[in-house]
Image: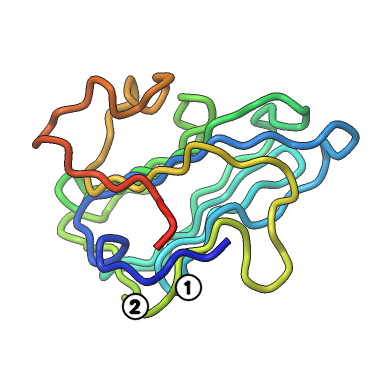
Amino acid sequence: VAYASNSDFVYNDEFTILADFKKDVGEELQGGRLIYKSGSYIITIGADGVSATIFTSKKLFTLSAAGVGINDSDWHRIAVTFSGETGRAKLFVDGVVVDQEVGLLGAVQVGSVRNALYIGGPFGDSFGGLVDNVLFAGEQLLPRNIAAADPMASWAKNGPLYSPVVAG
């Protein structure tokens, strides 16, 4: 699934990407690209691990974790937060921080406004299970919001400045 170019998805000094996913019964060891925006961010699900590659004005980096308990057919939530204000990026699985990057003070997430945002991968390497509740927020959500059933329900850092990913 491709979503039209949108300037909200690039050049952010803070953001959160969040998605719920579920592997199919009998396919618990499969994986693939979950979210892909060329030159901005790539989130990948593995057999029992996750990774998120983030492109910023300071550096390109990958957050990753293995053995995170996703080798089943249950629903899971993955989230990535980034803040140039705090200088940190974090990778969450089911509300728990599984990796983080520091040294990003003053960084801005980069990319091209022209590149589409894909749920899955554009080159046949997509995650093959179910995906739901994909959210891109132009702010760094707090861990309690990431773990909540409705991540935006009680969030009001600077008001409701977020964009649920919708067809464009």
Label 1: which secondary element: loop
Q: Is residue 165 left or right of residue 138?
A: right
The residue that appears at 55% across and 35% down in the rendered structure is 20
Q: Quadrant of residue 71?
A: top right
The residue that appears at 25% across and 55% down in the rendered structure is 104
Residue neighbourhood size for the residue with mark 1, other residues' Cα within 10 Å, grouped as few (<14), some (14–19), many (≥20): some
The residue that appears at 77% across and 28% down in the rendered structure is 73
The residue that appears at 22% across and 59% down in the rendered structure is 12
CA distance for labels 2 and 1? 8 Å
Number of marks drawn: 2
Question: In the orientation shown, which residue stands out farthest toward the left?
Answer: 158
Tell me which numbered mark, 2 or 1, is placed earlier along the sequence: 1
Note whether 89 is above or below 120 in the view shown.
above
The residue under label 2 is: 112
- Going by the numbered disc 1, the residue's amino acid type is Ser
Residue in front for this viewpoint, 3 or 57: 3
- Going by the numbered disc 2, the residue's amino acid type is Ser
Q: Position of residue 17 (x, y in %)?
A: 40, 46
The residue under label 1 is: 38
Question: In the orientation shown, which residue stands out farthest toward the right?
Answer: 26
Q: Is residue 123 left or right of residue 11?
A: right
Q: Is residue 155 left or right of residue 77?
A: left
Note whether 114 is above or below 58 in the view shown.
below
Label 2: which secondary element: loop
